[in-house]
Every structure is written in structure tokens, then in C-alpha cells.
Amino acid sequence: MTSRAARIGVREGDGGRGGAAIRIALALVQTGPVLILALLVIAMSVLSPFFLTGRNITNLGFQTSIVAILALGQLLVILTRGIDLSVGSVIALSGVLGGIVAGGSAAGASSGHGALVLLVMVGCGAAVGVVNGVVLVKGRVMNPFIVTLGTLSIVRGAALVFSDAQTVTGMPPAIQWVGTGKLGPLPVPTVLVLGLGLLVWGMLTRTQWGRWIYAVGGNPEAARRVGIPVHRVLMSVYVLCGIAAGIAAVLVAGRTNAGSPTAGQLVELDAITAVIIGGASFFGGRGSVWNVLAGALIIGVIRNGLNLLDVTPFWQSIAIGTLVIVSLELDVLRGHLEERLRAAQAREDPL
Amino acid sequence: MSAIPVLEVRGAVKSYGAVRALRGVDLTLHREEVLALLGDNGAGKSTLIKAVSGVLTLDAGGILVDGEPVDLASPAAARLAGIETLHQDLALFDNLSALQNFFIGRERRRSRWLGRLSPLDERAMAREWEERLERLEVRIPSAHRDVSVMSGGQRQAIAVLRAVAFATRVVILDEPTAALGVRESRQVLDLVRRLSHEGVAVLLISHNLEQVMQVADRAVVLHQGRTAGEAVPTPENHEALVSMIVGATPTHAGGEPA
């Protein structure tokens, strides 16, 4: 019986020699961001003797941390075919509210209860995430670009209203420590990025919820058909993205010892850029934490390196913009290669 | 046949705006039975199976499982009731591996108390995958490869297996051999046969009357949202079935009436 077992879709079928070449090309595309980062680091260290110094590397980790944390949240959203434009505004509102709770004023008085301030700031991010998620899921709009474009404006406006358009100076020591402190040789923000990266990676690759996030992005209709709670998955990624923005707000507030209603403008675009350079697909369902962190570092290395080389900042934007387009093309190339592989597979193993 | 049907649909009515897709369809499916659902495009087959698989809800009428009325309000509810569906579009996830597609929505977890954030038990899933495929006498060695790089036949096979492996009462197969060659089609049909002997009922939708005659015990024909008739699919009844499908003779041919 077993010998004439129904052999459905049997043979391993690597698609022959052509298949092997395509497979290697595919693997190269998938490790693209890390390769680009490695090349950039090599190039920068050849061109500038200061680049690879311990101090500069520490500095780089510190500078990249805010974009990196935002990018982790943004990755979750982009995996589900979404986008969250409101994170920059969250940094402003969260900072302002944190400053007010800390008892700071435009005059600049610093006081205690760091834990409460922390809770308010991260909670503010989560609350905006809930609003984004609810409007998206219940509002039957299903267009995250427009929904979060709306909250971008509303949240920024709220920050201006609550602060009377004034910077609220004075953050508790705990918040300042998160933004500027050190844990051993490493800046706290860098440790935070690594810790959060590990957490998000664990959730995405090792838990059922993480797998469902990929499933919802890969095929939303199929996700519904196999009984995945699509709406709850969507809600969760916007809330988590909001929480990430709240944590980024803590870093900004700690570093500047203030909550500014104009903080974080356009930083949402940096976060999205990091995710795209990090090889995540804008069409959903594909992307990894480490590649996205590499993406954030690529932006950092380009800015930092070109600064060291005394190149005008204008070239930084041209370089980063070019990389965004290259990354998008790589994603298209990936789809094309998979198509070729599938054809090779079918030829070799005609079912 | 046992007295209580494993699945019964009573007076199913469903409209899409002005279009009346189902105008009161009755259907009974018994344990260990392979029932073919036939009908032209637009006859209401898809709507009926979508209702049974929980993808849409009926405007009127009821669904009974083992004689008990059930509310199949969602695909998850249908799955819980032991009804699995192979959709025509396969409902696969290109970005996930064969094994991940197989277990999607029912992944095994290592501990209870973290719920859906508990670590996945990859080893248990790999083991269960082997066991289930062995029981179904099927092999798919490329378990960890993304289905996006698999051929049409392999994709179809994975989707069929997912539906078949987890069904405890009813498995609905919507054109299960659409992307398969002759040999593989036969293997799927063998699988359908074997399933029906294990106590699971099969609801088969197919345009291929030859296939239906090979595996089905009974055929129900829908025409313009109504039950046009039913027959035992044999070569003698071939013509009668065809005329029911095109709507020529709305009567019962052969077999005993429902």
C-alpha cells in the first residue's frame, strides 16, 4: 500500500541547474540589506579613519536608535500591508504630555515620578495606536494611509493645543537616563533597540500571533477563510506601532530634557525608509527584524559617514532616496525570481 | 445510511442585492458519503458551499450538523464544527512554507498560559505533519520551502491536504483537481474515496462528470438557485444529469428522491 502511496507533489525538485542559480540569486536578494550595510561600512572605514573608532560607532548606535525603534513598529504594520504615518506626531504629543505630567513648564522645572511619566508617554502612543486600529477596522475605510494621515494631523494639533505651542522643559531623571544614560559601555538607547529587536523578532518568528501577522499580510482573504481573527491582528499591529512610537518619544524627551510640540516632524518617513531599505515588502507579508535594523543603520551610516567625509547634507538625501528606489526594485526582482523558479519547478516536476 | 445526516441544509436563501443566488436549497449529506454538487456557472454552488464553510451567512434557512442546528457565523466556527474547505483559489499564503500553510490557524503551542504569544512547538508540528501525511499516504518533502516557489500542482496538493487532514465531519472540495494532471487527479480522487471510508463525508464540486462518476455516491444538481434534481452518477444517468445541469428537465432521474 505504502509503495504505491499517493505521491502528490512528491519530488524535491530544485528546478534543475537553472533553479540552483535562481535560488542563489534569491538568497542574495534576501540578505541584500545586510550586504549593503557591510559594503557601506567597509567603504566608509576605508575613506575615513574616524569612522571605525569606538566613539563614532557608539555615536552611530545612539543616533540611529530613534529611527530603529520606530522602524520596528512600522515593520509590524507594513507586514500587514499597512502604514502608520502618525508616529512622528506621537513623539510630539507623547513628549508634551510627559512634560506636563512631570510638572515641567515653559520655565523649565524638573521633578520626580519617572515611572508615571514613562507610563503616560508610552500609553499615549498606545492610545493613538488604538484610535488608528479602531478607525481602520471598524470604520470600514480600510485605507491605512488616509486614516493615519488624519491622525498625523490630529495628534500634532493636539500636541500644540496641550502645550500652547510652547516647549515643555524638564524631564524626570529616569527619562533623561533612558535618553542619554549608559549601561556599561553601551548607551541605553542602543540596549533598548537590541532588546526590543529581540522581542519583536521572537514574537514574529516564534509565536502564533507573529505567524498570523505574516499570514494577514500575505493573503488577507485567505487569512479570513482559515479563521484567523484578521481584525484583531490588524488592531494589534497599530497598537504595537504606537507603543514603539511612545518609547521613541521617551528617547527624544530624555535626550532633549523637554517635550516639544514640533518634535519628530517627518521622522515617520525615516522609519518607513528604514523598513523599505531593510528589504520588507510594501505589498505585505515579507520582512525581517534584523534586516530592518540593518536598514535603519544604513541610513545612519550614510548620514554619519558623509558627515565625516565633509560632504554636504544634500547628498545624503540623494543617496538615501536612491537606496529606497533600489530596494523597491530588489523587491520586484525577488517576485520575478520566484516566478522563474516556480516555472523551472513545474518543468522539472510536471504535475 | 444512518438516520441522522452529518450535514443538512434546509431552505437556504441568499441574495446579493437584486441577484437571488439561492432560492431555497435543501441538501443532506450522510456519513461516509461522497456527494457531488453539480450545476452550471451561477447555479448557486459557490454560494452554498460558502455558507457551509462559514464564509458568508444565509438570509434564510438553516444548517444542521449531526442533527443539531449550528450557527456557522465565521470560517473559524465551521472549522470548529469539523468542516474543512478546499477553496477554488486554494487560500494559500505565498510567503509561508508548506508546513506553515498546513497548520495555519491551528499552530501547536508549547505552553498554555501565554496563549497566542506562547512559543510555537515546531518539533511537534513537524512530527504531526509527518504522521498525518503518512496516514493519508502522501509525501511532500519540501515542507520548509515557501509555497511561492512551488509549482501549481504542488500548491494544489498542499491545499487539498490541509482541507483533508483536519476534517473530522465534512470536507468540501471545490474543484480539487483543477490544477492537476491525470495521474495526480486520480490520486486526489483516491484520497477522496479513502476519506469517505474513514467516516468523513465529502462534498465535491466538479465540472468533470467523468470524475464525478468515478468517485461520487450521489449527485445533486443546482439550477438557478434551486435544487434541480439528484441522481446516482452512473453512465446511464449521464444524459439525465446533463439535462438537469442545463435546466431542461427539473425532475428526479434514477436513484430515490431526496
Image: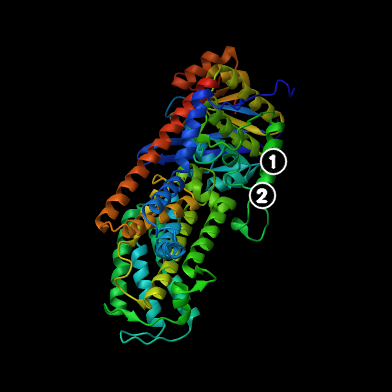
Q: Is residue B47 visible?
A: no
Of residues B119 and B87, which is closer to you in this image?
A: B119
Q: How is the image coloured?
A: rainbow
- Badge 2 is on which residue? B121
Looking at marks 2 and 1 on the same chain, the residue that comes earlier in the sequence is marked by 2
In the image, farthest residue toward the top: B236
- Pinpoint residue B225: horizontal percent, then vertical percent: 45, 32
Q: Circle 2 marks a residue in which chain?
A: B
Q: Circle 1 marks a residue in which chain?
A: B
Task: Report the residue at 31% width, 78% height from top.
Answer: A162
Same chain, labels 2 and 1: yes
What type is the residue that disc 2 sits on?
Asp
Q: Is residue A23 left or right of residue B17?
A: right
Of residues B104 and A76, which is closer to you in this image?
A: A76
- Badge 1 is on which residue? B128
Q: Is residue B21 left or right of residue B199?
A: left
Q: Is residue A138 above or below residue A101?
A: above
- Pinpoint residue A313: horizontal percent, then vertical percent: 27, 58
What type is the residue that disc 1 sits on?
Glu
- Pinpoint residue A105: horizontal percent, then vertical percent: 34, 85
Q: Quadrant of the N terminus of chain A?
A: top right
- Pinpoint residue B31: horizontal percent, then vertical percent: 68, 33
